[in-house]
Image (spheres, helix red, strand yellow):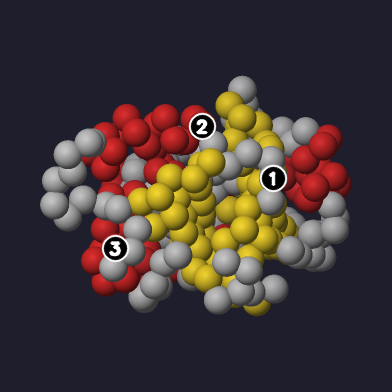
Amino acid sequence: MIIEFLGTGTSQGVPVIACNCRVCTSDDARNRRLRSSILIHVQGKTLVIDTGPDFRYQMLRAEVKHLDAVLYTHAHKDHIAGLDDVRAFNYFQGTAIDVYGDHLVQDALKREFYYIFAPHKYPGIPQINLKDVGNQLIAIGDAQVQPIDVMHYKLPIKGYRFGDFTYLTDVKTLPDASLEKVRGTKVLVLNALQKEPHISHLTLDEAIALAKQINADQTYFTHISHRLGLHQEVLTELPSNMSLAYDGLVLEV
């Protein structure tokens, strides 16, 4: 399984264009983060988790030629806004794209992208097969995907486990039943927004504590605000088996 981080950032905080902080003006490319999304090549399938506002550029930057499915964690705009751009894959592949989400995601997509679901469809609109995500394993070809229930403050959202790899973003709390589903993960991706308290996201200290509970061989933090600090400086504060992810990072699991 090959994993590429398409984006490791967040819409939280001051927009980069208006910010002169050390992070936003850094020459280190690891401090330049698009909205969080991840690309997964598994069992001959190519999947994306979340299509934020940067989705089109992320796919061009990663030179993605084929897409089999999109899985959504939740319906916030910074995670769904780029769905329209799957139309390019429809055109070149000649097929609809399977799109997975819970009922909250599906309701949001039907509101935000109403034209996709209109009875009389305009030519060239995205073609998708909307599929429900519950608690059962999802089969995408030969790939088996386990949805994980997590809480984004009071909003129930989904994480996903692929064998030894688990992706959890926008987490604030992880129910005990979900913690059991994550145990045994070798590579964990977890959100770490900033150091200061936040109502709906893990802080860096909270993310480290949760990562220690899960006890993966290696943990990567994502959904990072510029408020967290410079990439290289934050690395020095982390346990040896934890690291910050960055846009373009590729893992083999």
Q: In which quarter of the image is the N terminus?
A: bottom right
Circle 2 residue? 103
Q: Which of 251 and 1 is in front in this view?
A: 1
Circle 1 residue? 136
Residue that sits furthest to the left in the current view: 123
Residue that sits furthest to the front in the current view: 119
The circle drawn on residue 229 is none
Lateral position of residue 151 relative to residue 107, left or right: right
The circle drawn on residue 90 is 3
Which residue corresponds to the image point at 45% horizontal and 65% vertical from the top-left? 68
Q: Nearer the viewer, residue 37 or 69?
A: 69
Tell me the SS state at disc 3.
helix
How far apart marks 3 and 2 lie (CA) works out to 24 Å
Tell me the SS state at disc 2.
helix
Which tag, 3 or 2, sits closer to the chain's start?
A: 3
Which residue corresponds to the image point at 63% horizontal and 66% vertical from the top-left? 143
Tell me the SS state at disc 1.
loop
How far apart marks 1 and 2 lie (CA) works out to 14 Å
Q: Give the answer, above or below, for where 71 lies relative to 140.
A: above
The amino acid type, in three-letter code, at marker 1 is Gln
Which residue corresponds to the image point at 69% horizontal and 73% vertical from the top-left? 253
Which residue corresponds to the image point at 82% horizontal and 37% vertical from the top-left? 177
